[in-house]
Amino acid sequence: MHTPTSGEQDLDLAPIDHIRATEAGTGRWRALTDWWRDNRAALFVRDNWPLGVAALLALAVTGGLLWLLWVVIAGLLAGLGAAATAVGDAAPALGGWITDGPITRSISDPVRAYLDAHTTGLPAGGRDAWIAWLVAVGVLYAAAVTGSTYGRIGWAAIGALTGTAAYLGAPAGAGPAAAGLTAVVWLTLSLLAYTATRRVSLGDVLDSLTDRRARRAAADTTY
């Protein structure tokens, strides 16, 4: 058994004011490292940082898809514009052709006419039904582009419903043309919806984290 010398006793009994700054800093650093190693919040951050990265990536992808969806809906609502008369006007004219011209109105106007004619007597009018239709189109298209099976089925279904509404709501004799234009637009947009590769979902990330925790727990019990 070690018997402390008088010098060691004096050191043990020294007041805390005599601790050097380097010793105090070392103690704070040790306390910080102990907290980072043992604190539950710190453990959660260390174990789940891939989930945070995945969430940021998902937000970035969602923002891009929402922007693309806004462009698509603006084109469907506004229609097509005038053609360019010079090379310098080609880009603005193309944007106007997509957003403010007759082809889009050849789809949207018959659909709105059909909704207006078949919502009489309902609490929701034609305008309400039109807004609901736009929301459904946007959500289903975003889901289809991200690889959702339900979104792709819903995108095909709402495309068929849109073509039917355009056919029935068009003026007499113009139904086949309205339905045909709807099919062309829908098939063009479907190129991205049905050819997008499968992406890693949030469920995949959670499953991976669960498996990793299970392996860690098994390793801890082994040792």
Image (cartoon, rainbow, N blue to C red):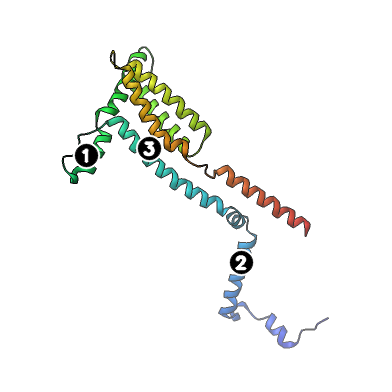
Q: What is the tally of numbered marks visible in this picture? A: 3
Residue at 41% across, 44% down: 63
| In the foreground, 37 or 61 | 61
| In the foreground, 24 or 167 | 167
Mark found first going from the N terminus, 1 or 2: 2
Classify mark 2: helix, strand or loop.
Answer: helix
Mark found first going from the N terminus, 3 or 2: 2
Q: Residues within 10 Å of mark 3 (few under 14, many from 20)?
A: some
| Tag 1 residue | 93
Classify mark 1: helix, strand or loop.
Answer: helix
Task: List x then y, in percent, for residue 140.
Answer: 45, 32
Q: Residues within 10 Å of mark 2 (few under 14, many from 20)?
A: few
Task: List x then y, in percent, for residue 175.
Answer: 32, 17
Is 126 located above or below residue 216 in the figure?
above
Q: Amino acid at mark 1?
A: Ala
Mark found first going from the N terminus, 3 or 1: 3
